[in-house]
Image (cartoon, rainbow, N blue to C red):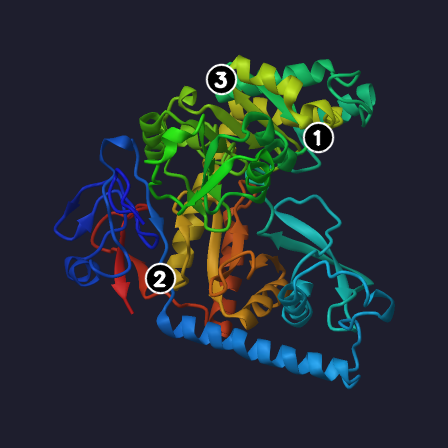
Amino acid sequence: MRPGPGGCCCRRTVRANGCVANGEVRNGYVRSSAAAAAAASQIHHVTQNGGLYKRPFNEAFEETPMLVAVLTYVGYGVLTLFGYLRDFLRHWRIEKCHHATEREEQKDFVSLYQDFENFYTRNLYMRIRDNWNRPICSVPGARVDIMERQSHDYNWSFKYTGNIIKGVINMGSYNYLGFARNTGSCQEAAAKILEEYGVGVCSTRQEIGNLDKHEELEELVARFLGVEAAMAYGMGFATNSMNIPALVGKGCLILSDELNHASLVLGARLSGATIRIFKHNSEFAAEFTAVYMRIYIFFSCFASMEGSIVRLPEVIALKKKYKAYLYLDEAHSIGALGPTGRGVVDYFGLDPEDVDVMMGTFTKSFGASGGYIGGKKELIDYLRTHSHSAVYATSLSPPVVEQIITSMKCIMGQDGTSLGKECVQQLAENTRYFRRRLKEMGFIIYGNEDSPVVPLMLYMPAKIGAFGREMLKRNIGVVVVGFPATPIIESRARFCLSAAHTKEILDTALKEIDEVGDLLQLKYSRHRLVPLLDRPFDETTYEETED
């Protein structure tokens, strides 16, 4: 991995835009002089980002402890051996559960999946399948109601008990600003539009499905982003996968971050362009790009599994150097980052004109559905006639459009209140508080200190299911993630913070996480942060200790 313009870009680093003196890192994590000398050549490597950054930029990816990595591989090895044993027992009809056995009438069909994928699903995934797809029956706010279910065939099927688990703390939804609710100005405005326009449009924008509300939304999005024009789409995933082939084709080169979302990956593959993958947040090589008609750089602003934020100032500098086009996916960052909630461009204080294609979704911070693309007027006019999402897809539902308009105006302060600004600030405070407390407890936490997506590392396969189940017993709903969505030894729980979370809710969740962490022995960090007692407290005043 090459170093970037701002310094080393080692994957397991803490990056800070500050000065280093006497063992301390200002605007970053503070080490004692003795600890700094001992740890300088180990896991945490602090770099300066020069003049590109106008604010501190700190990301931490602590290395997996060697013993934990070995035990994780051993755990997967044991599960694999038992899986083959169970397959043997199924073959000879000794195993009582026959759901994993191929039915006789299907044996002559071509396999839909590779052998290992089938093996993994029936022998590893099914053991912990109860941790996913839990149906909720309430608004996905700070607390949710979950329908209780049971399985009597090793998670191959579920039956509902009729009971409702009430008031589960929701730590898994992308409801960053808390607009996913059934009360307040957004709900009232959407209900009014529902009465006036109905639910569906039943047509595409190019036929008879172009409403005045769609035009209003696109004008508002363009003002919010600070670009000339914008276009809205009914599905966030299709905003990427169906628009990229309209912009990129054969003879072009796509430089794609390894952690890009599946929608970006699919769009790039459908385009027919040459694709080169580079390591996340590292400088990419482009010495060979002269033979291509156009160069496109694709980035997800949030690596939502890592809690990482794109190093946009460096990306823009490289984009200008190689005269490339920059396509920025702000699905997670729009609304959730920046002093005014305008995403990663706002977060770094950059000019929106430096980004050629600004993509984002309404499914997270705005509590709605759909996506958008913003940029030059020529770009948007071209997409209106060439994008499959524009030509063939049904228009956005009017109540959904009104939900987006109302929430966006709230963020911009155009509703006459400061509620939107307060929500953005509350999310930032909740994020820093939650991350700091988890690190104090001794958990390994990935990502940027300002990222509301907080990965807590679990590592071992048996602890994926155990963590999810133990948290639900304590009325906390969490998302757990394992292979193949993550590297095989980097299973994790992924918390999503929201402005709707009060300090009381966060403290309750933290108390239970701490208890489960002790129960499952998840506190792997060798660099626990503790408050420095000899100076006034603030969010960045910590000493790093070696356990």
Mark 1 nearby-residue class (10 Å; few <14, some 14–19, many ≥20): some
Q: Nearer the viewer, residue 367 or 492?
A: 492
For image coordinates 55% across by 79% down, the residue present is 78
Classify mark 3: helix, strand or loop.
loop
Taking 246 as reference, is 206 left or right?
right
Q: Is residue 227 visible?
A: yes
Mark 3 nearby-residue class (10 Å; few <14, some 14–19, many ≥20): many
Q: Which percent across, then down, holds residue 536? A: 25, 47
| Circle on res. 227 | 3
Q: Amino acid at mark 2?
A: Glu
| Circle on res. 187 | 1
Answer with mark 2 or mark 3, whichever residue precedes in sequence: 2
| Circle on res. 63 | 2
| Residue that lies at the very extreme toward the front in this rendered image | 291
Q: Amino acid at mark 1?
A: Gln
Q: Amino acid at mark 3?
A: Val
CA separation in Å, label 2 and label 1: 45 Å
CA separation in Å, label 3 and label 1: 28 Å
Q: Is residue 217 visible?
A: no
